[in-house]
Image (cartoon, rainbow, N blue to C red):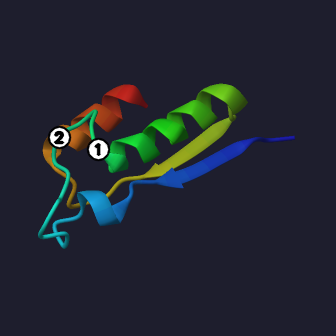
Amino acid sequence: MIKILIGGSPCTHWSIAQKNNRETEPNSGLGWELFKNFLIAKEKYQPDYFLYENNKSASQGIKDEIAKQL
């Protein structure tokens, strides 16, 4: 059996389309809480493969931190 974990960034919190209350700092906010849940699932289930779709318009700081933690 092959285990695969698939997830993605929360567009509603990190997207440039979000004019008000857009989260741009890593390690804080609801968007980051959702990402941490992906990390928890990755650690708990130890998949053979995982896919994490990033949000193209997320701030560079968030993208960098995601890359570091994955």
Classify residue 17 by image quadrant.
bottom left
Which percent across, then down, holds residue 31? 35, 50
Above or below for 24 versus 37: below
Q: Is residue 9 left or right of residue 23?
A: right
Q: Amino acid at mark 2?
A: Glu
Q: CA distance from mark 1 to mark 2?
A: 8 Å
Q: Is residue 7 above or below residue 42?
A: below
Identified at 35% across, 48% down, the residue is: 30
Name which residue lies at 23% across and 64% down: 15
Quadrant in which residue 48 is drawn:
top right
In this rendering, would 61 be left or right of 4?
Answer: left
User: x and y percent of residue 46 in the render?
Assistant: 68, 28
- Indicate the amino acid at tag 1: Gly
In the rendered image, the quadrant that contains the C terminus is: top left
Do the residues under discs 1 and 2 have CB atoms within 8 angstroms?
yes
Q: Quadrant of residue 33?
A: top left
Mark 2, Cα crowd under 10 Å, few <14 / some 14-19 / many 20+, is: some
Q: Is residue 42 above or below residue 59?
A: above
Residue 29 circle label: 1
Which of the pair 11/2 is nearer the observer?
11
Q: Residue 53, relative to residue 49: is it above or below?
A: below
Task: Say which residue appears at 45% left-offset and 46% top-offset.
Answer: 34
> Which is nearer the eye, 69 or 36?
36
Please rate how many residues cluster around mark 1, counting C-alpha atoms within 10 Å: few if below 14, some from 14 to 19, many from 20: some
Q: Which residue is mark 2?
A: 25
Residue 39 percent location from the top left of the image: 51, 33
**How many discs mark residues in the rendered view?**
2
Residue 19 coordinates in the image, percent (x, y): 12, 70
Residue 11, label in figure: none
Residue 6 lies left or right of residue 68; in this view the side is right
